[in-house]
Image (tube, rainbow, N blue to C red):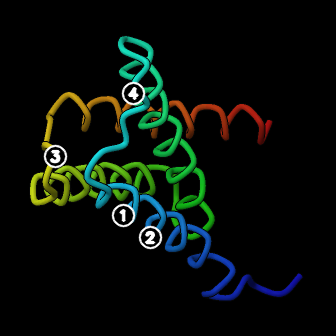
């Protein structure tokens, strides 16, 4: 079987990071649902990083994919600090990293 091309290995993760970057640049993503808004946004954080980590494994081994998602989480929060109405929160990085780890654990389980 031929080796996967650079594009097929990297473009899905790069495209996903572009989507994430665009959402991070949105001044307010609130739904107006009170406490549910917070829950939905935190679950979205974890989910999007689970997907990112899984996409990164197309090009990298598990540990580098996890570290790449971790690094992107940090830069994403720094980006949000520059967006009016948004803030950089260490707790969000922790939620993102937890999502990445859960995504990699799920992927490993599915590969069995």
Residue 93, image x, y percentages: 25, 38
| Dot placed on the residue nearer the N-terminal end, 4 or 3 | 4
Quadrant including the N terminus = bottom right
**Residues at discs 1 and 2 in contact (Cβ within 8 Å):** yes
| Dot placed on the residue nearer the N-terminal end, 4 or 1 | 1
Residue 55, image x, y percentages: 59, 59
| Dot placed on the residue nearer the N-terminal end, 2 or 4 | 2
- Residue shown at 38% from the left, 53% from the top: 69
Dot 1, crowdedness within 10 Å: few (<14), some or many (≥20)?
some
Q: CA distance from mark 3 to mark 1?
A: 15 Å
Dot 2, crowdedness within 10 Å: few (<14), some or many (≥20)?
few
Residue for badge 2: 18
**Residues at discs 4 and 1 in contact (Cβ within 8 Å):** no
**Residues at discs 2 and 3 in contact (Cβ within 8 Å):** no
Where is 63 relative to 56, above or below?
above
Q: Relative to the observer, which residue lies in front, 1 or 79?
A: 79
Q: CA distance from mark 2 to mark 4?
A: 19 Å
Farthest-out residue, front:
32
The image quadrant of residue 2 is bottom right
The image quadrant of residue 6 is bottom right
Residue for badge 1: 21
**Residues at discs 4 and 3 in contact (Cβ within 8 Å):** no
Residue for badge 3: 85
In terms of secondary structure, where does tag 3 sit?
loop
Q: Which mark is residue 42?
A: 4
- Residue shown at 10% from the left, 60% from the top: 82
Dot 4, crowdedness within 10 Å: few (<14), some or many (≥20)?
some
């Amino acid at each position: 079987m031929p080796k996967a091309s650079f594009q097929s290995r990297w473009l899905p993760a790069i495209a996903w990071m572009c989507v994430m970057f665009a959402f991070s640049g949105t001044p307010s993503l609130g739904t107006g649902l009170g406490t549910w808004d917070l829950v939905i946004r935190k679950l979205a954080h974890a989910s999007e990083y689970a997907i990112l980590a899984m996409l990164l494994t197309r090009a990298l081994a598990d540990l580098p994919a996890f570290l790449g998602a971790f690094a992107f989480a940090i830069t994403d929060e720094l980006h949000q600090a520059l967006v009016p109405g948004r803030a950089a929160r260490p707790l969000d990085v922790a939620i993102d990293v937890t999502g990445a780890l859960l995504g990699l654990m799920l992927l490993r389980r599915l590969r069995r």
